[in-house]
Image (cartoon, rainbow, N blue to C red):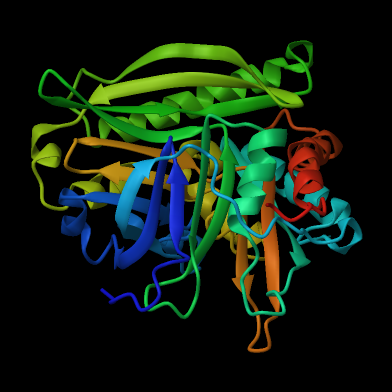
Amino acid sequence: MHTCVDRSSSWARFSGRLATRAVECVDIEAQPERLRSGLWFVVVDFEAAIGGAAGGSTGRAGRARAWRFAEVRDDDGTAAGPGWAGPAVGTWRSSLDQAAYEAAVRRVREHVRAGDVYQANVCRVLEAPLPVAADGREPDAAGLARVLAAGNPAPHAAAVHVPGGGGVDPVWVVSASPELYLSLRTDAGRGVLGSGPIKGTARTPEGLTEKDRTENVMITDLVRNDLQRVCRPGTVEVTDLLAVEEHPGLVHLVSRVRGVVAGDVAGAPDLWRRLLDGTFPPGSVSGAPKSSALRLIGELEPVPRGPYCGAVGWVDADAGTAELAVGIRTFWWERTGTEGEGVLRFGTGAGITWGSDPRSEWHETELKAARLVGLASRQALPQG
């Protein structure tokens, strides 16, 4: 836990809420009981060693953190900032080029043929240099969030920015996620856990294939099994299967799964560690079987995913509610040196099965990235 020195420039936005002035940051793995009271904004790296899942299987370290803020109010969307000025279009670089990505797809198909996995999500990370401003300010996360809200509205859009040097662990994440990882609601005194896995992406509904539908069913079953780890026996159900959802520039196949949280889990001081232990990382961005897919991801992907493919959202313990999105369509920024250097990153990926064509999967990652990277690269005018 840390005492904040400069709270004025830290904030978080999610689901119609705006929080300002970060007070503290906690490690969810080390102090899960802290999330049993108050309102917290959460960012979990894909590699976080929750339950030993992703971190242990990929061989990389990640963090699961939550921030509490001094003030929370309804977000009217009017807050202004210096304005977003993104990196130049030609400065973006990928952790895997087309040849390397297609080779990774072929490797996954070999493992499917050998019976090691049924599906694995292979991702690449795009990055571009983006330094701090001349006056020392970090890039305007609120500005990027406004650009994305205007050009790519998303049902689970989120942003969290706690600048470095303020006494609280820093974070800079802006997400236009369309996918629900976990929701928690109270119904008749019981906690109801929900998830909305996405598998299947195309420009139009007519472009969705049998491979997309098969993959969605496979991952929906994986999510159903994950929820059964923390829910009452017999309560987990698929309420919607293979629904077509339209998003800016593309369509997705989305399914819905829910269950009633088991009594021993619901009443445990470490509720959120248990929920994450049972379900993290999200099935749609890992694979099946999850443990085998994660080991394969660790072998094939040259850089960590960080908050991309992790979780971003909020936990309102006092109200007994929560909403965590899968950290896809997500940008994150980090300092890379002592002289104000920094880098903006964005992840994109695709689920690989035996039916995958390497070139088509590469183009799917291009489709998912093109609109958002284009928006983030736009040089915006300063705000009022």
Q: Which residue extends farthest front?
A: 384
Horizontal side of residue 379 vs 189, given as left or right = right
The N terminus: image quadrant: bottom left
- In this rendering, the answer to whether 81 lies above or below 221 is below
- In this rendering, the answer to whether 245 lies above or below 372 is above
322 vs 38, nearest the viewer: 38
Name the quadrant containing residue 136: bottom right
The reply to whether residue 282 is in sight is no
Question: Which residue is pictured at 59% across the width and 53% down the height?
Answer: 142
Residue 85: horizontal and vertical position, in percent? 76, 59
Residue 23: horizontal and vertical position, in percent? 30, 66
Residue 112: horizontal and vertical position, in percent? 63, 38
Question: Which residue is pictured at 73% across the width and 17% down the height?
Answer: 208
Horizontal side of residue 122 vs 50, given as left or right = right
Horizontal side of residue 272 vs 172, given as left or right = left
The reply to whether residue 360 is in sight is yes
Question: Which residue is pictured at 72% across the width and 49% down the height?
Answer: 107
Residue 264: horizontal and vertical position, in percent? 9, 39
- In this rendering, the answer to whether 281 lies above or below 251 is below
- In this rendering, the answer to whether 43 lies above or below 215 is below
Name the quadrant containing residue 279: top left
Name the quadrant containing residue 33: bottom left
Question: Which residue is pictured at 12% across the width and 18% down the height?
Answer: 188
Q: Which residue extends farthest right?
A: 90
